[in-house]
Amino acid sequence: MTPFSLQESVSKQRKSLSKFLGNALREHKEALAAVFHKADDLNDYLRKALRDLPYSKYIYALDKQGVQITPTIFHEGMTTVDFGRDRSQRPYMKHMLAQEHPHKDFELSAVYISKNQKRPSVTAIQAIRNEDDEVLGYLGVDYDIRELPPAEEIYEEPRQYRQIKGDPAIRSGLFLQQRVESHMDRQLDSVMAILQELMLEHGVHHCQIHYSSSRVTVWHVDDPFVYRILTMDELSDMSICLAYPRRPYPERAIVPKEDIMKIFKQFSALRFADRTIYLRSGSLNLINGFIGLNFSCDGTHYLIYDEFLQKGLGFWFGVDEIKEDRQQMLDDILENLCQSGCKDVNQIIHLLDQGEVPSELSELKADERHYIHKELKSIMSVYEAGNGVCAL
């Protein structure tokens, strides 16, 4: 079956409960009308009705103005604490008493927190009428949500892009802070490689990368209810993969295998593109394809992986994508920087890692600096992986 959205799921469940509970209460309205003005007989009938009404918690009667005229009866006894209580201003009674609904016979309240048990509850109200169709009063029955029949299907998270604002205190001080290089930032390439391997071959279907605190939280298909925390002590060693059993790529996964590293690299781009507004954490779920992003301003964003990959840095930081006519200019800058030698190149990389802007790149936009940063690191990694001799 197709999963429902949250609103559709709630509406469907309310409709089902209204039909079920309404039918149950309707069976008692004629008998209640016969004893409604006989206090002892009314209390006796309510005790019997409570036993007959499935899932019911409390039962009571109200007069036609919405004032309680009986004790509140429950399965273990009764209490008079609510006797004489005016319920006319409760939302469910307002609907029943409204003049525009003179023939309304049944109302199911919205879910609320009960006064006594402090648990999610609902109240069903049934109008009691005499033979002339005049309202004598109302039957009220309270239900504990935990004891009602459960929903048949779980709702599906909306798949459109969503943005949720964070802590106002953090946003107000945003420009007083800047990114500090973390332990993970310095080893990000190896961290991404390990995570890709865990997701492709070792059953990790969901991960959340915490860049600023240098840790990763993962969920495994064999034990999906439990998360595991990987610190940089574990993420610094590729042999961590041996601790996770080999598992085929999940059949339910909608994220293509080849897109996993693309997503991680886009996370990296958002981490280093700006020293003030930067990515603090990013999550990827292979099954539903959701990407979660939390930035230094404490804003959080959710979107599907393919939409995420289509958006460049310009979407997140309000800058333009690198245009074709500027690509040659950036390549010329790269060539000139490389000609300056290893020492100068490493110094530029270090400054960019720290979120600082080298004077040589001060005229470039954030996405253009990120391009230079990435290319310089890629070039230097070739030499570092070789014999250690820099040919620049």
Image (cartoon, grey):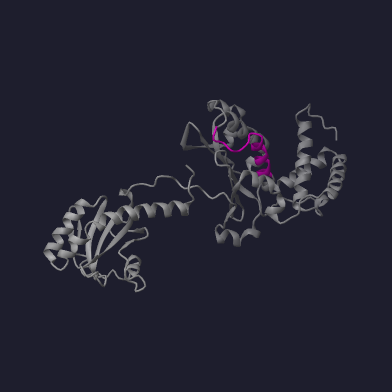
Q: Is residue 130 shown above or below 317?
A: below
Residue drawn where x is 81% and y is 52% of the image: 359
Residue 311, how many percent across, how many down? Answer: 69, 49
Q: Quadrant of the C terminus?
A: top right
Q: Nearer the viewer, residue 34 or 141?
A: 34
Q: Position of 172 compared to 128: left or right?
A: right
Q: Is residue 100 shown above or below 6?
A: below
Q: Quadrant of residue 80?
A: bottom left
Q: Position of 85 compared to 195: left or right?
A: left
Is residue 71 visible in the rendered image? The answer is no
Q: Quadrant of residue 91?
A: bottom left
Residue range corresponding to the magenta coloring = 251-268
Residue 179 located within the stretch drawn in magenta: no
Q: Nearer the viewer, residue 5 or 85?
A: 5
Q: Quadrant of residue 373?
A: top right
Q: Position of 170 compared to 320: left or right?
A: left
Is residue 23 visible in the rendered image? The answer is yes
Q: Is residue 136 shown above or below 376?
A: below
Residue 264 located within the stretch drawn in magenta: yes
Residue drawn where x is 11% and y is 63% of the image: 40
Residue drawn where x is 51% and y is 48% of the image: 157
